[in-house]
């Protein structure tokens, strides 16, 4: 399992899963490391602290490619940074599809009045 292989730490910043703290450029541990999300959440002050929750990132963005060398444990911050450009591309594609659908509806709507 990827989290076990990566020792339950982000491969980029090395912060451990379920650590409570805040970011000021880098992650600052203020409440410690916990074994479960529930324990960590109970210690975090709402609106000030975050709980690190690791996710598995697909390095090539292909979610069907589950080879070990394509997977890494990442904290929320580093996972989102890794996926940023991929998310922008998907967002642009979605906007284009919605625009095309709206334009298609306008064309079909005009046919009703002919």
Image (cartoon, rainbow, N blue to C red):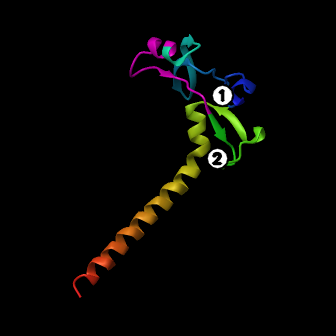
State the CA–CA distance, disc 1 to disc 2: 19 Å
User: What residue is shown at x 63% (from left), y 22% (from top)?
Assistant: 15
Sequence-wise, which precedes: disc 1 or disc 2?
1
Pick the front one: 11 or 37:
37
Q: What's the residue at 37%, 74% (across, down)?
A: 104
Q: Confirm or deny contact between disc 1 and disc 2 (CB under 8 A).
A: no
Q: Is residue 47 magenta?
A: yes
Relative to 78, is 94 on the left or the right? Answer: left
Q: Residue shown at 52%/19% (left/top)?
A: 37
Of labels 1 and 2, the one closer to you:
2
Which residue is disc 1 drawn over?
10
**Furthest residue toward bottom:** 114
Asked if residue 40 lies left or right of residue 102, the reply is: right
Place of residue 105 in the rendered image (x, y in percent of width and height, measured from the top left): 33, 72
Local packing at callout 2 (Cα closer than 10 Å; few below 14, some 14-19, many 20+) is few
Locate the N terminus and report the quarter of the image it occupies.
top right
Quadrant of the snapshot with the C terminus:
bottom left
Residue 62 in the image, given as x and y percentages of width and height = 66, 50
Q: The residue tagged with tag 2: helix, strand or loop?
A: loop
Check the image and report above or below for 71 versus 99.
above
Identify the residue shown where x is 61% and y is 21%: 17
What stretch of residues is rendered in magenta? 39-55
Question: How busy is the neighbourhood of tag 1: few (under 14 within 10 Å), some, or many (20 plus)?
Answer: many
Which residue in the structure is indicated by mark 2?
63
Q: Quadrant of residue 28?
A: top right
Residue 104 sits above or below residue 51 on the image: below
The residue tagged with tag 1: helix, strand or loop? loop
Furthest residue toward front: 112
- Occupied quadrant, residue 71: top right
């Amino acid at each position: 399992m990827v989290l076990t292989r990566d020792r339950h730490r982000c491969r980029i910043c090395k912060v451990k899963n379920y650590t409570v703290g805040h970011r000021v450029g880098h992650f600052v541990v203020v409440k410690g490391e916990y074994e479960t999300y529930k324990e960590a959440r109970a210690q975090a002050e709402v609106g000030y602290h975050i709980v690190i929750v690791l996710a598995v990132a697909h390095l090539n963005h292909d979610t069907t490619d589950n080879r070990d060398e394509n997977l890494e444990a990442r904290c929320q911050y580093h996972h989102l940074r890794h996926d940023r450009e991929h998310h922008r591309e998907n967002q642009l594609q979605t906007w284009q599809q919605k625009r095309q659908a709206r334009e298609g509806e306008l064309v079909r709507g005009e046919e009703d009045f002919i």
